[in-house]
Image (cartoon, rainbow, N blue to C red):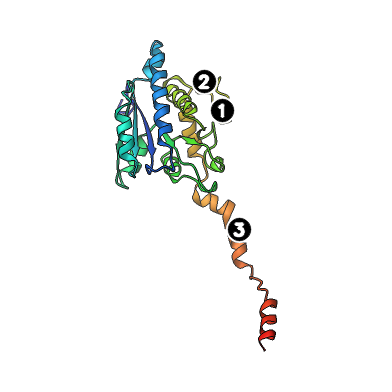
Amino acid sequence: ENKIKLRGDRPALVISSTSWTPDEDFGLLLDALVTLDGKAKQSLTTAAVAASFSHIVVIVTGKGPQKLFYQEKIKSLHLTHISIFTMWLTPSDYPKLLGCADLGISLHTSTSGIDLPMKVLDMFGCEVPVCAKKFDCLEELVVDGVNGRVFDTSDQLADQMFQLLLSQNGGISSSNENVSKSEMNNSEKISMLECYRKNIHGMARWRENWNECAKQVIWTAASTPLSVDTTKDEESDKKEN
């Protein structure tokens, strides 16, 4: 049959984007990858797990002041089942790489507590599930167990990556309490990542969100005349006269 299909022994592809600044703790991802590499080594005694963990390729895009510092740290890790590459991509190549990814990682934390990471929007635009660092308003975008996972620590991130990448070939684990209703109701045995991709595909897009959440609020505010208090100005004029 003339069908395009994924190679059985292909590596898992994980993408992260960073500005290489202190605003994002990239060390958290490196710690998680060290733990994940150890988990992979311990699990290779199981044939099914060994097949799922043939290799993991992690590509980190972006440029910034701490890039050289972390590149040196990456060289010193000596991981067995994980390869880490750093690169800078053109705007036309970046979405192509995202479209090939199995999983995205977001280390963004909001200093204001009200802004959402654009990198996650980019990943969702290519229907790539995300593991995202938790902060106050993140649930407006990433819903844990529905379109990705949310973590606080490097150990949590390592566990989530292990579970999600392992499920690529093994199907959904019924013991995962964070699996969404749509996953549990699906009669086919598909991976958690595939379920998250399906949920991302069904998410409301910009125009739908605008019409549902913002349009009427802004329209009403724009059409309401502003009331100006002129009392103080009149009293000031009387004093001057």
Q: Is residue 126 above or below residue 40?
A: below
- Residue 50 or residue 198, whichever sits in front: 50
Q: Residues within 10 Å of mark 1 (few under 14, many from 20)?
A: some
- Say which residue label 1 marks: 178
Q: Secondary structure at mark 3?
A: helix
Instruction: Please tell me which residue lies in front, 183 or 48.
Output: 48
Q: Is residue 81 left or right of residue 125?
A: left
* Circle 3/circle 1 CB separation < 8 Å: no
Q: Quadrant of the N terminus?
A: top left
Task: Please state which amino acid type lies under the numbered disc 3.
Answer: Gln
Disc with the residue nearer the chain's start (3 vs 1):
1
Identify the mark at residue 173; answer none if there is no mark. Answer: 2
What residue is rendered at 56% in x and 27% in y? Answer: 178
Which residue is label 3 attached to?
Answer: 216
Q: Is residue 218 above or below residue 225?
A: above
Q: CA distance from mark 2 to mark 1?
A: 10 Å
Q: Of discs 3 and 1, which sits in the foreground?
A: 1
Secondary structure found at label 1: loop
Expressed as whole percent of the image width and height from the top left, the position of residue 169 reads 42, 21
Name the amino acid, label 2.
Ser
